[in-house]
Amino acid sequence: MQLAFSDAVYLVDAIEGGEELSIACKLALESNYITKVIHDCKRDSEALYFQFGIKLNNVVDTQVSFLVTRLQLSLFFLSQSYNVPLSWQNELFSLPK
């Protein structure tokens, strides 16, 4: 696990740390005030919940973000190619018009 702060970055062996680490990190991982950035967090989220009872909150999943951005760009370029107005995309993705 990587923990990044404004003044330092830590690499932590989550397996070696086990339950002691989970107790130390639980408040931060469950916090709505701290943003967690994780790539493909499904398995990590499941493991934290079922092994330690930790429910991740306020997570940005970079894999999901990438897929949504790619889909939006694909639809944009498709709409440009076929002269389709962007208004239908705004409704689909709830984007501001």
Image (spheres, rainbow, N blue to C red):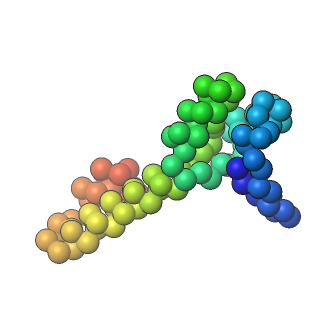
Above/below status of 82 relative to 46: below
Residue 46 located left or right of residue 79: right
Above/below status of 80 relative to 21: below
Q: Residue furthest right?
A: 7
Tell me if residue 4 can be seen. Answer: yes
Q: How many marks?
A: 0
Q: Residue furthest bottom?
A: 81
Residue 6 screen position, x and y as percent: 81, 62
Residue at the (72%, 54%) spot, across then down: 2
Residue 31 located left or right of residue 92: right
Of 55 and 13, the residue lying toward us: 13
Of 79 and 59, the residue lying toward us: 59
Residue 55 located left or right of residue 69: right
Residue at the (83%, 32%) spot, across then down: 20
- Residue 68: image quadrant is bottom left
Residue 18 screen position, x and y as percent: 76, 34
Q: Quadrant of the C terminus?
A: bottom left
Q: Residue furthest left?
A: 82
Residue 70 located left or right of residue 12: left
- Residue 14: image quadrant is top right
Above/below status of 62 relative to 79: above
Residue 46 screen position, x and y as percent: 56, 33
Residue at the (21%, 68%) spot, across then down: 79
Tell me if residue 55 can be seen. Answer: no
Residue 22 screen position, x and y as percent: 76, 34
